[in-house]
Image: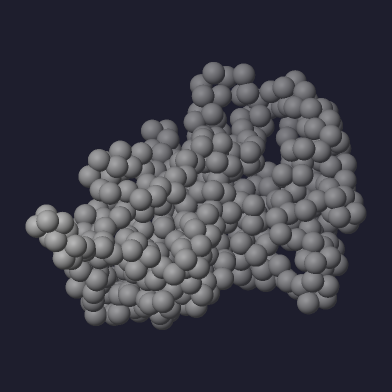
Amino acid sequence: MTGEADQIGAVVVTPPVAVSVPIAVDLDETLISTDSLLESLFVLAKRKPLELLRLPAWLAQGRARFKHLLAEAAMPDVHTLPYDREFVAWLRTEKQNGRSLILVTGADAALANNVAAELGLFDRVIASDGTTNLSGDGKRQRLVAEFGEKGFDYAGHGRCDRPIWRAARKSILVRPSPGLLKTEVKLSDVDRIFDDSPPSLDIYLHAIRVHHWTKNALVFVPTIAAQQLYSIASLAHGCLTFLAFSLAASCIYLLNDLTDLPDDRLHPQKSQRMLASGQLSAVRAVALIPALLLAALALGLIQSWSLLAILGLYWGLMTLYCLKLRAIAVVDALAVAFGYSLRVTGGAVAVGVPLSIWLVMFCILFFFSLTLLKRYAELITMHSLMGAAGQARAYLVQDRHRIALFGCASGYVALLVFGFYIVDLNDERYSRLALLWIIWALLLYWVTYLWLMAGRKKIIGDPVAFALRDRVTRIVGLLALVTVLVVG
């Protein structure tokens, strides 16, 4: 009886229902598959590049103040941020089941509040406020103070979230690295894992646009012009220079895509790029840029200081193009054209052959024409999508006919200059002049063909991308290659 009475009179303590435990959610690399601080930096770089000079002074005031000032100067478009759809869908389900959701982030409160307003999911926002930097152990202390030890579940991504997972009731891992996943499964009470395989090699190759490396074959032009194509030494220098410019160009492609992220995410075609689509995170891209640049400069340095200087000039010009020049009509096309001419100049320096001024002028004019063709194709696309109100960078839809006029004129003048270059060569130095006229004729046909296809709306975006898959261009390229091999 006593035992029965004890059981009847005993107070049964019911454990708290899981639904009463709030879910604290991190922002960077968790709710969004990017880093909001990097997004802000690249927005600032595009809109106000000179403001980048103030970053050291802002950082000297502390990380929290730095984030606040950066958010004031360059707020990312929260509508276009790459939200993790699967994770957000799960959060919505938990919200419907009665869970309280709290956005807890080291990002500035202004940005965090904008994200919360965009999603309409969160009951509260806890973020850095310009004075307190809410990250790492500071975030853990704030959550424990608010909800108590084991009084919340936490969704995070990286190693900096480890102290918070230790204090949480349940851990929710979003896209953790393999090493971190292995550790946390042992040390934390993991409730759910939103796993995402790391980017494949194919994604990296697309991001750095290896398929555009064909443009860097221009470094072989001086070798061909000097009839040294079959020289082992010249060919080796040419290959190293080709790789150096390819790596430097890939570095610029990544920088270009990072500064263009908000616009690319809204573009019908560019939204499929690796960074804009979220297949490659901004964090990985930023880490890749210095590696590509250092590799390119190292390949230049092992050949000559002059080639290193040209590579540096090329990288500087293209960086300036990404940050400012591409927003200035015509100047943007000239910058790209000079970038191509630097490839030819680099090829000449690498092989150690004199470079004809006619050849340099031809390259500038020819690639000025191709760049204007790309702008024309973009304007044609925007006209189809938005009508007369369409715009592509610094160009308006109503500019498209003038752009076509300028581009065609530049292309044909380039061929005239190339003709002068051929005439300027003498028989003693160049034994197969007649074959160069074949190349001239092929270029004349190809320039005309490209502009004709652009007018027919067959070219969308980059003409080089069109050329790589176009049957007519392949035939022209094959004929030109055979001619070059004979000339070389």
Residue 410 coordinates in the image, percent (x, y):
78, 56
Examine the rendering and report whether any part of residue 182 can be seen. yes
Q: Residue at x 84, y 30 (%)?
A: 475
Q: Residue at x 42, y 35 (%)?
A: 299
Indicate how the structure is coloured in the image. one colour
Q: Residue at x 30, y 55 (%)?
A: 170
Residue 180 higher or lower than 22, as above or below: above
Residue 39 coordinates in the image, percent (x, y):
46, 65
Question: Foreground residue, 139 or 443?
Answer: 139
Question: Foreground residue, 96 or 28?
Answer: 96
- The tally of labels here is 0
Question: Foreground residue, 434 or 97?
Answer: 97
Examine the rendering and report whether any part of residue 38 can be seen. no
Q: Is residue 165 left or right of residue 396?
A: left
Q: Which quadrant of the figure contains the C terminus?
A: top right
Question: Foreground residue, 392 or 414?
Answer: 392
Residue 341 higher or lower than 44, as above or below: above
Q: Which quadrant of the figure contains the N terminus?
A: bottom left
Residue 444 coordinates in the image, percent (x, y):
85, 43
Q: Quadrant of residue 276?
A: bottom right
Residue 109 coordinates in the image, percent (x, y):
36, 78
Q: Is residue 38 left or right of residue 267?
A: left
Q: Residue at x 9, y 57 (%)?
A: 2
Q: Quadrant of residue 337?
A: bottom right
Q: Quadrant of residue 187?
A: top left
Q: Is residue 415 left or right of residue 279?
A: right
State the residue lying farthest toward the left: 2
